[in-house]
Amino acid sequence: MTKKKKKIISFLLFISLTLISSVGIGIYKVFFQNNIVLPYNETETYIYIKTGSSYQDVIRTLDTLNIIKNFTTFKILARIKKYNQHIKPGKYLIKSNMNNNQLIDMLRMGKQVPVKLIFNNNIRTKKELIDIVTKKLEVDSLSLYQTFENNSLYEPWGFNSHNILCMFIPNTYEFYWNTNSVSFFERMYKEYKKFWNIQRLEKAKKANLSPIEITILASIVLQETKKIDEMPKIAGVYINRLKKDMPLQADPTVVYAIGDFSIKRVLKKHLEIDSPYNTYKYKGLPPGPICLPDPVTIDKTLDYEQHNYLFFCAKEDFSGYHNFAETIAQHQQNALKYKIALNKKNIK
């Protein structure tokens, strides 16, 4: 082989290796080179892909966030992996060290991060619950409200539009961001069934009350006292009244019926409101809970004290505890002491 031919072969080999190297570098950049840039030295952020989004919607969202260094390489790999045919909604965690391959695989496979949804015992109404849920999940308030009014969904579970809030046990739950209203309700029913285990069901049966009735009673107990050690005693008073077919005469139910939760002192005029939640006018439990009682309050209600008290009144020292009485005469004395204390503090 002549020197000239050797030079030509060497040159062609060099060109081939250069091309292969260039292609290899190009492939590496498309697949494995970091392609995320986050502002202010942040290490992660989130992208929300709405239900029904198209590939172009995703591109616009990423463009708006301005976190992709090189859109050309991203789009090349997205076409190769056919991501445009596999758009999945959800909330996704974007990390600063991600490459195109990791990002597209995550989006294509729907590997979203869960959202923490917290219910507390301060929730009193459906609207308050809806507001909390719609701030965390994709579902809109109208859809969730319509589900709350859709009796055909939850009547088979034993609920109605008045007591449906009993199904929501305060706790921290994890949901996927794109959970719809029906799936949300189905999940909460599973959590409700899990909470009402055999032990709790047996205690409710001994009290001659259903889980829903226990929850309604617990909601009243919670609004009467925040003292956990006093809850069983107050629950016992209401159990005694129910057994004797006496009206519960619970002030918090009157406040709920009025709908003005700023009321600090229930007056005679307030007792005149005609509402099934006014337990001064109507015997038995109200048709639904007046708040979402937490598991502790429900358990304290299930473990109610067995005593002879039929009345209780807030203590005049404003400690948050109550004076209990077996007779109306004793109760009136306790009530008078509290009334005098209120007047001294000019609490209307």
Image: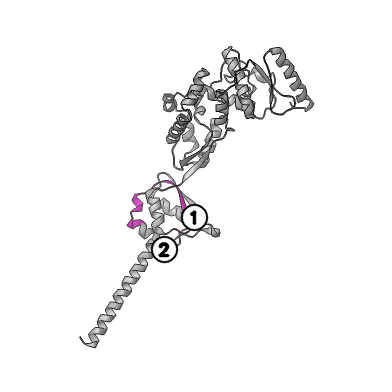
Magenta segment: 78-97
Residue 300 at what x, y percent from top left?
A: 57, 26
Magenta-colored stretch includes residue 347: no
Q: Residue furthest left?
A: 1
Cα distance in 3D space between marks 1 and 2: 20 Å
Instruction: Give yes or no for contact between labels 1 and 2 (Cβ–Cβ under 8 Å).
Output: no
In the rendered view, does 211 fall on the left or right side of 73?
right
Q: Amino acid at mark 1?
A: Leu
Which residue is rendered at x = 35% and y = 49% of the image? 86
Quadrant in the rendering for residue 21:
bottom left
Q: Which residue is mark 1?
A: 65
- In the image, residue 88 sits, relative to residue 118, either above or below, namely below
Q: How many marks do you count on the picture?
A: 2
Question: From where the camera sits, is residue 11 visible?
Answer: yes
Quadrant in the rendering for residue 79:
bottom left
Magenta-colored stretch includes residue 83: yes
Residue 14 at what x, y percent from top left?
A: 30, 78
Which residue is rendered at x = 44% and y = 42% of the image? 178
| Secondary element at image label 1 | helix
Residue 190 at what x, y percent from top left?
A: 44, 32
Q: Residue furthest right?
A: 344
Q: Which residue is mark 2?
A: 33
In the rendered view, does 63 fall on the left or right side of 269?
left
Which residue is rendered at x = 44% and y = 53% of the image? 60
Question: From where the camera sits, is residue 282 visible?
Answer: no
Foreground residue among 113 and 177? 113
The numbered disc on residue 236 is none
Which residue is rendered at x = 65% and y = 29% of the image? 227
| Secondary element at image label 2 | loop
Residue 297 at what x, y percent from top left?
A: 58, 28
